Amino acid sequence: MSDDARAIENLILSYAECVDAGDLEGMAALLADATIGVEGMAEGLRGREKILGLFNSTIRIHEDGTPRTKHVTTNILVEVDEESGTATARSYFSVLQQATGLGLQTIVAGRYRDRFARGDGGWHFVERRFQTDLIGDVSRHLLAGPEILGGG
């Protein structure tokens, strides 16, 4: 794997690490220059403060300061265009959760479609689109209903 592909994979995995740690500020910083949204929908959300606001209003943070989740990201396929300094990635995600009244289980699974650009500080997200394929009990993960996940 090239150094560029590894750096991009690290960004993808850092997103999961931030969310699972309840570090929504860190997650918003990773996506500060990106547009995020549901795959297939033209509209997206852009800007660090808007992205942070979205996640603060939708992700339930438990007593321990985390959402009590583990985002497992697999099947990561990175394609780098060295000449243009851009890249794309596709991956799968599964979200495991264990919370009060909820035994360990998979609560949602889907796919990410990401675009990246290389800048002075290295690689950064330009776009993150997600598609939800399977939805379980997200009542202890989301402050809103499962419709915010874009279907399933």
Image (cartoon, rainbow, N blue to C red):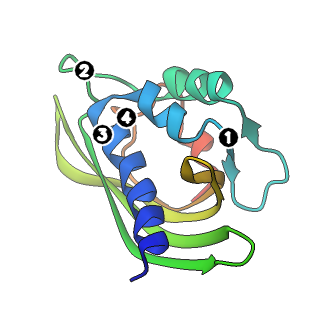
Check whether the beta carbons of the residues at disc 4 and disc 2 lie within 8 A of each other: no
Question: Distance between the Cα atoms at labels 4 and 1?
Answer: 26 Å
Residue denoted by label 2: 65
At 51% from the left and 40% from the top, the residue drawn is 30
Rendered location of residue 12, percent (x, y): 44, 57
Rendered location of residue 85, percent (x, y): 68, 68
Residue denoted by label 4: 141
Question: Distance between the Cα atoms at labels 2 and 3?
Answer: 10 Å
Give the quarter of the image for residue 50: top right
For residue 139, which numbered disc appears in the image?
none
Residue denoted by label 1: 33
Mark 4 vs mark 1, foreground winner is 1
Task: Please tell me how crowded label 1 is: few (under 14), some (14-19), or many (20+) other residues with Cα within 10 Å.
Answer: some
Q: Earlier in the sequence, mark 1 or mark 2?
A: 1
Q: Is residue 126 left or right of residue 142?
A: right
Q: Compare residues 53 and 100 and report the one nearer the observer.
A: 53
